[in-house]
Image (cartoon, rainbow, N blue to C red):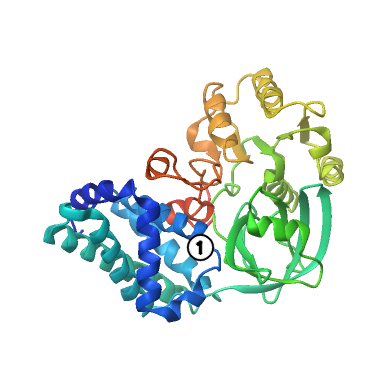
Amino acid sequence: MPFDPAVIRASFAVVERRADHMAKYFYAHLFAHHPGVRDFFPEQMAEQRDRLFAALTQLVLRLENPGQLTGYLRALGRDHRKFQAAPEHYPAVGASLIAALRHFSGHSWTLEIEKAWTEAFTVIAQVMTEAAAEDEPESPAWWEAEVTNRRRGAPDVVVLTLAPDRPYPFTAGQYLSLCSPRVPRVWRPYSIANAPRPDGSLDVHVRRVRGGLLSTALVEDVMPGDRLRLGPAIGDACLVPGSRRPLLAVAGGTGWGQIKALLEDLLAAPDPRRVMVYLAARSDADQYDLAAVEQLVDRYSRLDVLLAAPADGADRTSANGLLTDSLRAHGDWEGWDVHLSGPPGLAPEITELLLGLGAEPERIRHDPVPETLNRTRPLTSSDWFLDRRDVAWINRTELGRTEPPAPEA
């Protein structure tokens, strides 16, 4: 590694508490010196500034693991094709990043620190641009997809069916990022809620998030005939090929979409495995896809589904209690493959519970989990330091994994 990770970490700690101010300075510097790049960014920049610092944080955290850092950067490089990032943009970004770091480091900034950051960004740019160039002959930067069907599952949930304009390769259990012209240049990740189909169509289950620009547009405004852009499929929370172990799947809310895709994948070929699904919701009214659940149970004799939803008006603690009590009642989960999908708190809580009930950690699969679901913007530098941001597209590019798991030996 040509740069000193210790120098990078120490200098980053100096500016971290002034993250929001530094991010504003960075973008002001970038747009002032290179006004042409402004068109690549969303009109509302508040969340974009969050993403900048979240990305820097993830990079700094990976400095001690070069393999992990390289994988993460390669995934970011491929993913940034959909933002139309080109090799000539990286020097501009690097110059503005150094300028912002220098400005907010004050008297602690040294030539040694500048050298380390310059070398680090050179590595970042090289890895990302190489990955993007390698990916270009293999796949488009994005797919255009028409919304062919829209179903309201609950007051704040819709199921959208999409028809990509060309073949869209993916494996059941993966997710994609998408954006809508109704909210230009705002991309968000959503699980693909079906196994591959002969007609190539895709389903996504979308819940409106308070303050979420894209989720609100998708739930309230997007209609059949609208066109969306899709990034490539990513993620490795897929079925392990060749596994004969029984399968436990735990889904909460729209996390059901990912589990539904895995179940459809199992049904595509004879599979004698036993499958147990625990489907949690905030209330009976929030079980928005029960018709599909019943169809799967009818088709698959070794599939058992337990619904965990408290009475209407109960709080989330009641829903969590029903789910965890049901999992405890089963007893020993040793020897089971486990898939978890749902809101950010579900995977860590259920993982801890299942490990105490005999599940093996290497058998538990889920998408990367954001550090927090706090979507309010920090008001002070102390808020930034004490309260990590939830930036889904950064957190879900964990380890740069874009391929499904390999078959077992």
Can you name the residue that lies furthest to the front here?
379
Q: Quadrant of residue 317?
A: top right
Q: Quadrant of residue 288?
A: top right
The residue depicted at 47 percent of the width and 75 percent of the height is 38
Whether residue 84 is visible to the viewer of this picture, yes or no, is no
Foreground of the two, 295 or 234? 234
Q: Is residue 316 above or below residue 164?
A: above
Query: From the viewer's perspective, is 358 left or right of 16?
Result: right
**Residue 71 horizontal side relative to residue 243, left or right:** left
Which residue is painted at 27% across and 46% down in the image? 13
161 left or right, relative to 77: right
Q: Which residue is mark 1?
A: 45
Q: Residue furthest left?
A: 111
Q: Is 274 drawn above or below residue 55 in the view shown? A: above
Q: Quadrant of the N terminus?
A: bottom left
Measuring from the top left, give residue 181's x and y in whole percent.
Answer: 66, 72
The image shows residue 109 at horizontal and vertical percentages of 17, 56
Residue type for callout 1 = Met
Up-down relation of residue 231 to residue 393 (above or below): below
| Nearer-the-camera pick, 220 or 147 | 220
